[in-house]
């Protein structure tokens, strides 16, 4: 009698921690891939703000609910939210019911639209690293800082534009997830693939 060989799982970043299918898919398909899409970047920035003080897995499991609640993170729709919309969101168990973060999402949409009158959010952010993703060679989680000079500079600039819940640590998590940096550990099976995408990456020109 023969038995089927057990499929060996690829090596992944230690932060993944628990065996969760959605979390694993996020790590294997999204985290570290360079993003330029305006709405995707705005969504990620907002969700990282909601994540502050919580685990990303909590946000990830509610992401579809967030998208529905905030109309696909369409800033032009979000800026029209009134008090009744805030109350609706505060009653929505499918998202994180934090009034300060909900109100910040509305003001962030306003800031984003003001910024867009001058330049794209994508170009604004990528210009801080001269349009070239920073490919690190981290071997342990201890080597990954909570914030960097770049995340501090972006945080300061975003706050000046009127964005909220965009501290340096939140911004660095955003940079890691959105491919501005490659913080996959070097022995992770995604390190090389993301590094290749990042080397080929073309930053937006406007």
Image (cartoon, grey):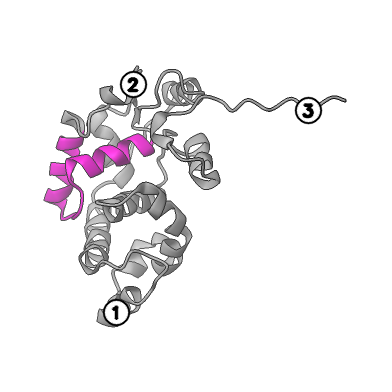
Rendered residue at 34%/26% (across/down): 133
Quadrant holding the N terminus: top right
Residue 171 covered by magenta stretch: yes
Taking depth in this image into account, of 171 and 53 the one nearest to the observer is 53
Q: Residues within 10 Å of mark 2 (few under 14, many from 20)?
A: few
Q: Residues within 10 Å of mark 3 (few under 14, many from 20)?
A: few
Q: In whole angstroms, how far apart are the C-alphas of marks 1 and 2?
A: 44 Å
Q: Identify the residue under disc 3.
A: 4
Taking depth in this image into account, of 24 and 130 the one nearest to the observer is 24
**SS for tag 2?**
loop
- Residue 132 placement, left or right of 68: left
Q: Is mark 1 in CB contact (under 8 Å) with mark 3?
A: no
Q: From the viewer's perspective, is the residue at label 1 or at label 3 nearer? A: 3
- Magenta highlight range: 151-178
Taking depth in this image into account, of 160 and 61 the one nearest to the observer is 61
Q: From the viewer's perspective, is the residue at label 2 or at label 3 nearer? A: 3
Task: Say which label, 2 or 3, has the lower sequence index.
Answer: 3
**SS for tag 1?**
helix
Rendered residue at 48%/44% (across/down): 23
Q: In whole angstroms, how far apart are the C-alphas of marks 2 and 3?
A: 34 Å
Task: Say which label, 1 or 2, has the lower sequence index.
Answer: 1
Q: Identify the residue under disc 1.
A: 87
Rendered residue at 19%/39% (across/down): 154
Q: Residues within 10 Å of mark 1 (few under 14, many from 20)?
A: few
- Residue 104 placement, left or right of 6: left
Task: Say which label, 1 or 3, has the lower sequence index.
Answer: 3
Question: Residue 37's mark?
Answer: none
> Residue 136: x, y in percent?
33, 20
Q: In whole angstroms, how far apart are the C-alphas of marks 1 and 3?
A: 54 Å
Q: Identify the residue under disc 2.
A: 140
> Residue 32: x, y in percent?
41, 33
């Amino acid at each position: 009698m023969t038995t089927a060989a057990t499929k060996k799982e690829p090596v992944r970043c230690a932060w993944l921690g628990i065996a969760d299918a959605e979390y694993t898919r996020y790590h294997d398909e999204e985290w570290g891939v360079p993003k330029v899409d305006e709405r995707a970047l705005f969504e990620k920035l907002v969700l990282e703000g909601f994540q502050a003080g919580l685990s990303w897995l909590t946000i990830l499991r509610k992401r579809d609910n967030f998208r529905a609640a905030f109309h696909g993170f369409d800033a032009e729709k979000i800026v029209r939210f009134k008090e009744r919309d805030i109350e609706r969101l505060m009653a929505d168990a499918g998202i994180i019911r934090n009034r300060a973060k909900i109100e910040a999402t509305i003001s962030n949409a306003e800031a984003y639209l003001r910024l867009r009158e001058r330049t794209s959010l994508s170009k604004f952010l990528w210009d801080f690293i001269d349009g070239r993703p920073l490919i690190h060679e981290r071997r342990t989680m201890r080597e990954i800082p909570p914030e960097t000079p770049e995340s501090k500079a972006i945080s300061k600039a975003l706050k000046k534009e009127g964005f909220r819940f965009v501290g340096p640590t939140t911004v660095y998590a955003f940079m890691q997830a959105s491919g501005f940096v490659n913080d996959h550990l070097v022995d992770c099976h995604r390190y090389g693939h993301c590094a290749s995408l990042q080397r080929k990456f073309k930053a937006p020109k406007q």
